[in-house]
């Protein structure tokens, strides 16, 4: 009699012991799935940031030298929103004079910057002190 009841008791005692690791395994699996889901989401976000950084690059400043009573180069093409920097390399003062804006008098080594947010088109300019000094900025989209 005790020999028959003992194996069944042993089975009953073992059952919870087998179930507990299975439950733990299931919980671990759920945690693993949740973690994997989060990892995938952050990977997508990282890609988005990288793409934004790539498109956010700005065009470099265009340099014009004022040298020998002339603008060098005399004609430049810039994208709308791009900045132009004039540097007076002459020992005499010059200016950069557009119809709608102009620089102060630039002594040797002085610089003047203008960001061309103006509409696309051709913008002629000159030196207010030496009107024969002429230049042109072409703004494109
Ligand atoms: Cu001048």
Image: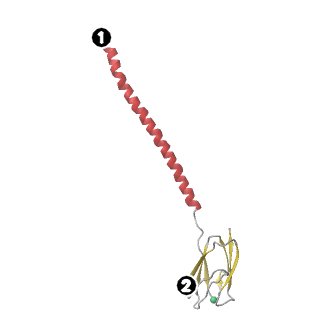
Tell me the tag on residue 3: 1
- Please provide percent x and percent y for residue 102: 62, 82
Question: What's the residue at 30%, 11% (across, down)?
Answer: 3
Q: Which residue is mark 2?
A: 110
- Please provide percent x and percent y for residue 4: 32, 10
- Please provide percent x and percent y for residue 77: 67, 74
Question: What's the residue at 47%, 39% (across, down)?
Answer: 33
Which circle's residue, 1 or 2, is located before the other in the chain? 1
Give the camera-side residue of 128 and 46: 128
Quarter of the figure that contains the C terminus: bottom right
Q: CA distance from mark 1 to mark 2?
A: 107 Å
How many marks overall? Answer: 2
Up the image or down, 4 lies above or below 121; here it is above
Give the camera-side residue of 20 and 99: 99
Question: What's the residue at 69%, 71% (across, down)?
Answer: 120
Question: What's the residue at 55%, 60% (across, down)?
Answer: 53
- Please provide percent x and percent y for residue 76: 67, 76
| Residues packed near mark 1 inside 10 Å, few (<14), some (14 to 19) or many (20 plus) | few
**Residue at the left extreme?**
2
In this rendering, which labeled residue sits more in front, label 1 or label 2? 2
Would residue 132 be found to the left or right of residue 54 on screen?
Answer: right
Up the image or down, 7 lies above or below 119; here it is above
Ligand 1 - quadrant of the structure image: bottom right
Up the image or down, 136 lies above or below 58; here it is below
Quarter of the figure that contains the N terminus: top left
Would residue 37 be found to the left or right of residue 24 on screen?
Answer: right
**Please, what secondary structure does the residue beneath circle 1 have?**
helix
């Amino acid at each position: 009699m005790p020999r028959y009841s003992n194996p069944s008791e042993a089975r009953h005692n073992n059952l919870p012991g087998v179930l507990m690791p299975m439950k733990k395994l299931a919980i671990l699996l759920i945690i693993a799935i949740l973690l994997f889901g989060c990892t995938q989401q952050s990977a997508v976000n990282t890609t988005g940031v990288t793409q934004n950084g790539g498109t956010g690059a700005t065009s470099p400043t265009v340099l014009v030298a004022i040298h020998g009573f002339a603008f060098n180069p005399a004609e430049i093409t810039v994208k709308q929103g791009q900045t132009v920097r004039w540097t007076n390399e002459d020992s005499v003062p010059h200016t950069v004079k557009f119809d709608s804006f102009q620089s102060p008098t630039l002594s040797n080594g002085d610089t003047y910057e203008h960001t061309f947010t103006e509409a696309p088109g051709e913008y002629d300019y000159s030196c207010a002190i030496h009107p024969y000094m002429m230049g042109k900025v072409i703004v494109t989209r």
